[in-house]
Image (tube, helix red, strand yellow):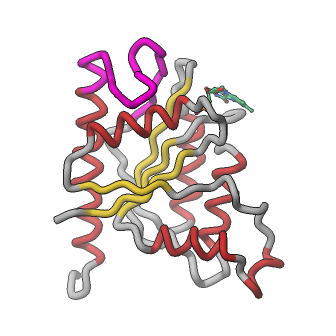
């Protein structure tokens, strides 16, 4: 069966290395995953003042999350945490109260940095947020990508076989995880 994956790129930068990583992941993913980006750049900054009359951008975001079988976050680390634009999008998706769109959605978190930490601290912050939002997360493998321009082509080709193998494995494990959570969420499953 085909599974619909909504993916977030946590960077608004035109030359985003995480956008490049997302292209590589899509190319290397199992064929039964179908990817649609959930865009975050046009969202206003969230406030609960919007809850009474949720704007179209917020509704579209929630519908995109709810219509996905799984969610993948491909994000940089900013100041050892989640980039503000991505956190804002997550806040939108979690509200109005009682309509948290992330509830029970299988999620994966991956990110690239030029530095050796490879977004590990951002991912740790994301795990707290997604746990609070009741979103199951792929726990292993973890993927902290040190981005090298000679390895990742702008169109998503990966020129180093061991990196390609690792990312392919990550996406296979992510796919299997999404399938397990979907099965567990199905009506009738104990
Ligand atoms: C960074 N960068 C960064 N890198 C990192 O590994 N840990 C960090 O905490 C930070 N902090 C940070 C804050 C801010 C405001 C910026 C703009 C950058 C560097 C960052 O990894 C680098 O700019 C990447 O290119 C960001 O990913 P995108 O936007 O290219 O996908």
Residue 167 placement (x, y as % from top left): 30, 33
Residue at left offset 55%, top offset 26%: 113
Total of numbered circles in the picture?
0
Residue 68 lies in the magenta-colored region:
no
Residue at left offset 36%, top offset 48%: 139
Is residue 62 found left or right of 54 in the rendered image? left
- Of all residues, the one furthest to the right in this rendering is 49
Is residue 9 found left or right of 52 in the rendered image? left
Above or below — where is 6 with respect to 159?
below
Q: Nearer the viewer, residue 60 or 112?
A: 60
Residue 144 lies in the magenta-colored region:
yes
- Hey, which quadrant is residue 140 in on the image? top left
- Of all residues, the one furthest to the left in this rendering is 1
Name the quarter where the C terminus is drawn.
Answer: bottom left
Q: Nearer the viewer, residue 71 or 60?
A: 60
- Of all residues, the one furthest to the top in this rendering is 150
Residue at left offset 29%, top offset 60%: 178
- Hey, which quadrant is residue 14 in on the image? top right
Q: Nearer the viewer, residue 167 or 116?
A: 167
Q: Nearer the viewer, residue 33 or 141?
A: 33
Q: Which span of residues is magenta-colored?
A: 143-164
Above or below — where is 77 with respect to 35?
above
The secondary structure that most of the magenta stretch takes on is: loop
Is residue 101 found left or right of 161 in the rendered image? right
Is residue 87 found left or right of 19 in the rendered image? right
Residue 81 placement (x, y as % from top left): 66, 40
Above or below — where is 142 with respect to 3?
above
Q: Ligand 1 shows up in which quadrant of the image?
A: top right
Residue 124 placement (x, y as % from top left): 55, 43
Residue 1 placement (x, y as % from top left): 16, 65
């Amino acid at each position: 069966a085909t599974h619909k994956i909504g993916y977030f790129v946590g960077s608004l930068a035109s030359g985003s290395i995480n956008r490049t990583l997302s292209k590589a992941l899509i190319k290397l993913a199992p064929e039964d995953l179908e990817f649609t980006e959930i865009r975050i750049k046009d969202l206003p900054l969230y406030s609960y003042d919007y809850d009474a009359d949720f704007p179209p951008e917020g509704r579209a975001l929630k519908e995109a999350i709810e219509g996905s079988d799984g969610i993948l976050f491909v994000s940089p680390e900013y100041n050892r945490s989640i980039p503000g634009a991505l956190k804002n999008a997550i806040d939108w998706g979690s509200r109005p109260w009682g309509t948290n769109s992330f509830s029970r959605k299988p999620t994966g978190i991956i990110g690239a940095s030029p530095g050796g930490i490879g977004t590990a601290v951002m991912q740790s912050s994301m795990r707290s947020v997604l746990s609070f939002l009741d979103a199951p997360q792929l726990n292993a493998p973890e993927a902290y990508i040190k981005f090298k321009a000679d390895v990742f082509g702008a169109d998503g080709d990966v020129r180093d076989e061991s990196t390609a193998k690792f990312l392919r494995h990550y996406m296979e494990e992510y796919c299997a995880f999404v399938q397990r959570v979907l099965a567990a969420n199905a009506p009738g499953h104990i």
